[in-house]
Image (cartoon, rainbow, N blue to C red):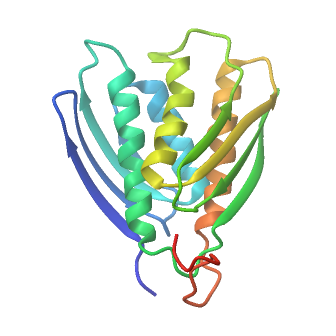
Amino acid sequence: MTARRAEIQRSTTETRISAALVLDGTGAGTIQTGIGFLDHLLQALVRHAGFDLELTCRGDLQVDDHHSAEDCALVLGSALDQALNARRGIARFGHAYAPLDDALARAVVDLSGRPFTAIDLGLQRERLGDLACENISHVLRSLAVGARCNLHVDVVRGENDHHRAEAAFKATALALRQAVARVGGDDIPSTKGVL
């Protein structure tokens, strides 16, 4: 069985990021983005997806959190895309609900090779820790762009924004876990013959 892993380095004038991703992991993550709440969300994502991730980012946080949040998600998505290679023998589709106390989130993913997102988290606060709430949805969108996948995430209910955001990432993780699962064979799950 071929190991599904990827290593990505990205260096711009705004961020320097290094990531190593293993799809068939144990849920272990060493994540240091410089943004505590982003680390928390990404840790939840890899834990519940069953991925292993080492990710470090040195970003221009003196400007704000946007560049680091966006670029970390792009790198993680690109690593996912690279680790999937031609996407042979995978389930391709995944869907999940995840509750966290008062919050309930739903995520649906299609590893189609075509990025599209519909994200509705309904967050009310301006920030969670050092992460702007507008960037939480943006992280999911950037992840989908990097991974070349179709991602729908919405929070069905919940009052606490921390719970809403975390439930969204846990639901996304569970959906990704299903979608990347090996289902046997070497077929590309598409009538087009390519993803």
88 left or right, relative to 117: left
- Outermost residue toward the front? 192
The answer to whether residue 151 is seen in the rendering is yes
Above or below for 170 versus 8: above
Counting from the top left corner in percent of width and height, residue 170 is at 65, 44
Q: Which of 182 and 37 is in front in this view?
A: 182
Residue at 34%, 14% (x, y): give it.
64
Asked which quadrant contains residue 162, the reply is top right
Residue at 58%, 61% (x, y): give it.
111
Counting from the top left corner in percent of width and height, residue 28 is at 46, 54
Asked which quadrant contains residue 17, the reply is top left
122 left or right, relative to 37: right
- Outermost residue toward the top? 126
Q: Which of 106 and 37 is in front in this view?
A: 106
Above or below for 61 versus 176: above
The answer to whether residue 101 is seen in the rendering is no
Above or below for 184 versus 150: below
Counting from the top left corner in percent of width and height, residue 168 is at 67, 37
